[in-house]
Image (cartoon, rainbow, N blue to C red):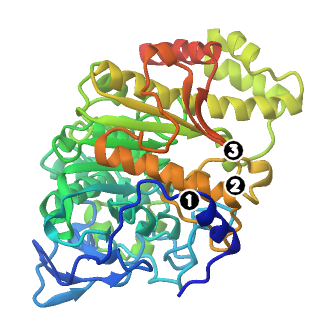
Amino acid sequence: MKPVHANRVLYILSFAVISTCTISAAIPDPVRLDSGSVSGNPADDAGVRAFKGIPFAAPPVGDLRWRAPQAAAHWDGVRKAEQFSPNCTTGGGGGRGGAGKGKGPGGGDKGPAPAKAAAPAGPAPSEDCLYVNVWTPAKAAGDRLPVMVWTYGGGFTGGSGAEGRYDGEAMAKKGVVVVTYNYRLGVFGFLAHPELTKESGHNASGNYGMMDMATVLRWVQKNIAAFGGDPRKVTIAGESAGAIMVSAMVGSPEGKGLFQRAIAQSGAWMGLSIGKMRTLEQAEEAGKRALGTHTIAELRAMSTQEVAQNAPGVQAGIIVDGWLVPEDQSLTFLKGKQNDVDLLVGSNQDEGTFFGGPPATAEASKTRAKQTYGDLSDDFLKLYPANSDAEAVASGLMRSRDETGWHQREWAQLTVKRGKKAYLYYFTHVPPGAGARGASHTAELPYMFNNPPANDSWQVGDHKLADMMSSYWVNFIATGDPNGKGLPPWQAYSAKNDGQAMVFGDTVQFGPQIDAPRLAFFDKYYAVVMKK
């Protein structure tokens, strides 16, 4: 039995759990899937069963490297789904993967203790990594519970569905089937090259990680009912790079019919700043430069480490490949051609503190403003002045905060224009131990998953916030509306409340996010970017 921290005891006594289902027994083993039967483990709570390391595709190795995912091999008997698979590798060696590592977009999150107790080091990262994990509170296959499919962040070069902060038990206890998975990273997940484009059958290459996501969603459609989930109530969700993947799938014709709702945290199709998406031609040229004289056949014959050594510097990320992403998704969303889904989206108050880097200087900041914003640079510097080095640093952080928040608001705005509902949030709570990082990029994750850090440094207010935030998320996943009994009202986005959002801070209330002049500036800048 896990020890119960005093803060947690006090919290349980002082604040009722919101919208938690009373579940006495989890789904029995074995669970029969399209590729074979699996058995899982009871989670810490007897009402949840966890299934880990289920293959959703064949290992993408050898001749299958840089190809669309192929079907997983069928197995006889009952496969034990009790341990996480290896994380996807970028080929650089380094430490072992596993749950509880708490990596952020660059694989270097050094903030507060990671959520959940750290597990022993898992298998070494590998190309054989296309596996899915399921936490279910269902008692039987016919329960038809809502489903969340989570896509992790990590800058497309790190992260894992096995990270402890993504443990799905706490959300599952509230009545949701939680699915996490791995997708290919770095050169293995995002290399574009003319040879790969020619052989693809779609005249496209580069978005292999996104192909993995689409394959998982098809796997969910075929198999989630066996875990007590409802394939007609699927929400795709993700943070940072995962949020970019979510937006790409919302905008992709390949996502049609595979999900009904979307949650995106601190990221959308343009990334974390305003700009056009990379084209296939640009990505192919970068791929040719990275490979030099090597052919694709030669690289497929190489080891994982040799590929990483011979194809350094491949820029990982979603590109306009003409198939999965037919056009720059700014155009897709502006035309209202995205998939017809409701949306929950938002960002954090101190996004920029996560990424570090050398301190900005006043001179460099003014130069960068002129280079980036051109004729709008004077307007920018009025809103984000750089008259001293200290002011330049502060303005840089404000710009990061507002540009990311603007992008999320833009997506909400275009969703409402499409005739669907959108709910915008703004996370301002500073976790214990965060210090100057504040409510940084990734800070909301333990709260929305309701996973306290390993050392349970949370106070009563942290536990209360996590319970409320996870309840909003569960309600949205279940119904498309985050509101519920005992929760402060969360207004859907509209033109009337533009600049406002559900604020998750020391108090939870609907209120101001970004002021009108800053929104207007980024509206103006976005229009300039789209004309280029």
Residue at left offset 42%, top offset 27%? 492
| Residue that numbered label 3 is attached to | 506
Is 496 in front, or is 238? 496
Q: Nearer the viewer, mark 1 or mark 3?
A: 3
| Mark 1–mark 2 CB contact (< 8 Å) | yes
User: What kind of element bears circle 3?
Assistant: loop
| Residue that numbered label 2 is attached to | 431
- Label located before the other in sequence (1 or 2): 2
The CA distance from mark 1 to mark 3 is 15 Å
Tell me the quarter of the picture where residue 115 sits: bottom right
Residue at left offset 74%, top offset 21%? 384
| Mark 1–mark 3 CB contact (< 8 Å) | no
| Image quarter in which the C terminus is found | top left
Amino acid type at mark 2: Pro
User: What kind of element bears circle 1?
Assistant: helix
Residue 147 drawn above or below residue 116: above
Q: Position of residue 110 (x, y in %)?
A: 69, 62
Amino acid type at mark 1: Pro
Residue at left offset 34%, top offset 42%? 262
